[in-house]
Image (cartoon, rainbow, N blue to C red):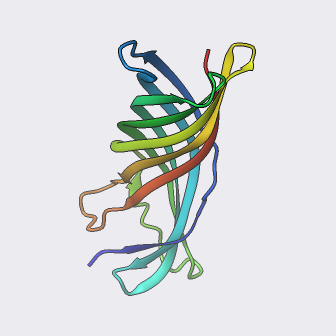
Amino acid sequence: IGDTFTITSHQDSNALVGLGYFISDKNSMGMSYGLNGFYLPSTSVSGEVIQEDLFTNLVYRYRVTHYPVYAVAKSTLPLYSNKSALTLDIGIGPNFMYLSGFKERSIDNGITLSDHAYLRHTSATFSATAGIGFKLNQILGNIPLECGYRFFYLGQGRFKPRTDQLLTSLRTGSAYANAVLCSITV
């Protein structure tokens, strides 16, 4: 029958750090293309294990870290003057999802033993991003400042079983992120 893993809590907020490189397309107004890479630090997920779909004797916890890399197209639409612009970003690429720290703990005073069923695992999943922003072209001398919203679809990860005798696979489900971010162009 296998075990069922329920989610009782997960960490919903975090920070991200990113770096991008763009090349402007001289033939089309306001278009640039490039690469973006991000680091989303570790978040945690925890829940209960229903063993053989009958008994809730264990709780579990794990951590997940994301390293998405995107091929990005960016459109910059000038507003009333050359001092500001609206920006639109869209990108696709792999997300290197690192799952670690899987631990189980007995909740029935040690009667049930932990399975220690899963190993850490890194997998590359399909990922996409889209964003909209507002750019001020001369905020720090000639250095522009852009602030906006970005949505990330980060894919689904899975843990590697310790043994092939396990009937249950542990998957993360779809991971998403919403971010308010600011960037400068140098």
Residue in the foreground of this view, choosing between 109 and 57:
57
Residue located at (37% from left, 43% from top) = 127
Q: Quadrant of the C terminus?
A: top right
View extreme (right): residue: 140
Residue located at (37% from left, 50% from top) = 155
**Percent position (x, y) of residue 111?**
52, 80
In the figure, residue 139 lies in which quadrant? top right
Q: How many marks do you count on the picture?
A: 0
On screen, residue 98 versus residue 107, left or right, reads left
Measured along the vertical axis of the image, is residue 90 above or below residue 61? above
On screen, residue 8 versus residue 166, left or right, reads right
On screen, residue 167 versus residue 58, left or right, reads left
**Percent position (x, y) of residue 124?**
34, 40
Residue in the foreground of this view, choosing between 143 and 53:
143
Residue located at (28% from left, 64% from top) = 166
In the figure, residue 97 lies in which quadrant? top left
Q: Quadrant of the N terminus?
A: bottom left
Residue in the foreground of this view, choosing between 37 and 87:
87
**Percent position (x, y) of residue 72?**
40, 30
View extreme (bottom): residue: 54
Residue located at (45% from left, 30% from top) = 75
In the figure, residue 18 lies in which quadrant? top right
